[in-house]
Structure formats: C-alpha cells, structure tokens
Image: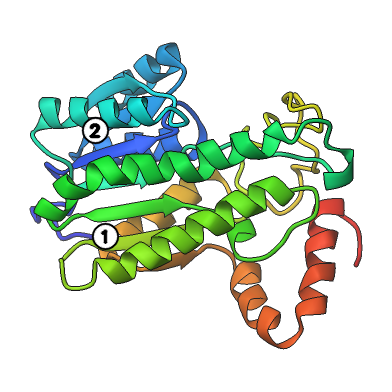
C-alpha cells in the first residue's frame, strides 16, 4: 500500500489494455483508471468498450475506447497511433486479448482453428508490441503479457491454445533480454483458472464457440478481483514473471524432476477426476 498523499505508480501513466471489454481486461482497466491512469481500451465489441470506458471514468481515470481486432496488424497500428494522439505517449501495454479452445486434436475438423488462435493470442501481441515499443522505451515503461499456465506446460484439449501461449512466453522472454539496459521491463503473467467467460467462449472442434464452460466452474477458480490485484502488484514491482497459483509454481519444479507426473496432473485438472 502507498502511504496517504504519496503518488500512485500508475497515476498519470498511459496504459493500453487489449481484450478490455470483459473479464480480466475489463477489471484491470477499471482498476488502473481508479489509480489515476489514462487507459486506452481495445477489443472488437465497440458497445462493450463504451460501457467499460464509462466505468473507467467513474473510477477516476481518463479512458479512450478503440474498437480493435488484434488479429488485424493494421488495427494494432491504429490502436497505438490513436492512444499517442489522445494521451501523448504510452507507458504500459497490457497484451491481454485472447481466445481458447476445447477439443482433442484428432477431433478437430478445420485446422484454421489453430491459425486463428495463433493470430489472436500470439501475433496480436507481437503486432501491438511492435508499434507500442518505441513509445514505451521513450518512457522506460513496461510490457505486460497475460499468458497462462498452459504457456508453461502442455494441457490436453488445449493444444492450439497451449501452443499460442508457449509462443507468447518465448517471445516476451526473448524480448526481455533484448531490452536489458534500456529501462524497459517485461512482465509475463501466468494465471490458472480465473472466473471469467473465456471458457464458455472456447472454440470447439468445428471452430465455433461452445456456449458453456467445459469444466466444473465450482472447482478451484480464482476470482477476477484477486487476479487483478496480483497483476497490479507485479506491475508496480516491475516483476519479470507472475505465476499466480501454488499449483502452478510447484508444477514448474515438478516438470524438471517428474515430468510424467505433471502430465497426469494436467489431465486430472481438465477431467476434474483423480489422476
């Protein structure tokens, strides 16, 4: 906590948040606005963005809604351009936009599903980062990648999602090294199950949204506010990585010494049954 009267680290900073129309992105954007940040909101749903914009302004920050499909490289460029025009620069980019899937690989009907996942989850972050990076470096700012525990270990029924998040992890880990000495930091966030609608919108084997979550949401699921609080703390401390759950942290150690056990635990997490 900051002492009374002390300036908040995000006060007056300009932050771009992709995937800002719902879930983690929405809650994070509103929380940042409450800390006095200027927030540029990006997502495909223009109406939802206007709703989030209003919430950000009520929270005390300035907000800009920029309807954006991060799967379109030109849209990523326009997002950064409009943010700079409105607020004069960029301090932080939060690459949060993403979609998931739920299907065994052998049941997939159209491999275009994999291209779509990679285009949004991975290449969307690459394009946004490319255009924002010169502005962020000028302010010695921060790049944030909201990845997943599936970016660290394979998960059944999520082959395309895990591949896109592994790509994201590798890209930002490599970029972090390139940026050493510039004053610009890179934070990779790896949540576990968070109480959002992302799994209800998961793409099935035909490439269409399932319409309901394939897992028992009554199971171990982190609430969005807790998730956002952890991200904000990691941003303030300019951590290099945030693995949110104890299971996830233990899993990284187990993967080195007992990889077969990690496979069984991953299968259990998806099935909701004992390994």
User: Which sits earlier in the primary sequence, circle 2 or circle 1?
Assistant: 2
Q: Dot 1 lies on which element?
A: helix
Residue furthest to the top in view is 47
Q: Give the total of numbered labels.
A: 2
Q: Residue 240 or 164: which is nearer the viewer?
A: 164
Determine whether 72 is above or below 132 in the image.
above
Query: Is residue 191 at least partly visible in the picture?
Result: no
Outermost bottom residue: 257
Whole-number angstrom distance, CA of label 2 to CA of label 1: 22 Å
Mark 2, other Cα within 10 Å: few <14 / some 14–19 / many ≥20:
many
Residue 230: give x, y in percent of width and height.
42, 57
- Tell me whether circle 2 and circle 1 mark residues in contact (CB < 8 Å): no
Q: Is residue 247 left or right of residue 228?
A: right
Point 9% across, 56% down: residue: 6
26 above or below 259? above
Q: Residue 245 falls in which quadrant of the image? A: bottom right
Q: Residue at x 65, y 53 (%)?
A: 162
Q: Percent x, y for residue 131?
A: 25, 40
Q: How packed is label 1: few (under 14 Cα within 10 Å), some, or many (20 or more)?
A: few
Q: Secondary structure at mark 2?
A: helix
Q: Which mark is residue 226?
A: none
Position of 198 with respect to 208 (left or right) is left
Residue position marked by numbered label 2 in the rendering: 80
Q: Residue at x 20, y 61 (%)?
A: 184
Question: What residue would you read off at disc 1?
Answer: 236
Q: Is residue 236 visible?
A: yes
Image side of residue 92 versus residue 86, left or right: right
- Please name the colour scheme applied to the rendered image: rainbow
Position of residue 251 measured from the top left corner of the image (x, y, whole percent)? 67, 74
**Residue at 47% over, 37% down:** 97
What is the quadrant of residue 21 in the picture?
A: top left
């Amino acid at each position: 906590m900051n002492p009374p009267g002390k300036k908040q680290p995000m006060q007056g900073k300009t932050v771009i948040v992709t995937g800002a129309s719902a879930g983690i992105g929405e809650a994070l954007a509103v929380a940042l606005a409450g800390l006095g940040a200027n927030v540029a909101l990006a997502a495909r749903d223009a109406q939802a963005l206007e709703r989030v914009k209003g919430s950000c302004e009520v929270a005390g920050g300035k907000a800009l809604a920029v309807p954006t499909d991060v799967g379109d490289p030109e849209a990523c460029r326009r997002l950064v351009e409009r943010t700079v025009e409105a607020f004069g620069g960029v301090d932080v980019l939060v690459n949060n936009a993403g979609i998931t899937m739920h299907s065994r690989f052998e049941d997939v009907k159209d491999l275009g599903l994999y291209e779509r996942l990679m285009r949004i989850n991975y290449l969307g972050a690459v394009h946004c980062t490319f255009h924002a990076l010169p502005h962020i470096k000028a302010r010695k700012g921060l790049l944030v990648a909201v990845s997943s525990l599936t970016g660290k270990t394979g998960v059944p029924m999520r082959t395309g999602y895990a591949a896109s998040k592994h790509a994201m992890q590798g890209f930002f880990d490599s970029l972090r090294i390139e940026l050493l000495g510039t004053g610009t930091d890179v934070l990779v966030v790896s949540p576990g199950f968070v109480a959002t609608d992302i799994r209800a919108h998961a793409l099935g084997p035909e490439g269409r949204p399932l319409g309901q979550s394939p897992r028992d949401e009554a199971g171990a699921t982190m609430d969005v506010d807790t998730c956002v609080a952890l991200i904000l703390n990691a941003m303030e401390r300019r951590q290099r990585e945030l693995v949110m759950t104890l299971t996830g942290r233990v899993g990284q150690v187990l993967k080195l010494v007992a990889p077969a056990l990690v496979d069984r635990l991953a299968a259990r997490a998806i099935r909701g049954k004992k390994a």
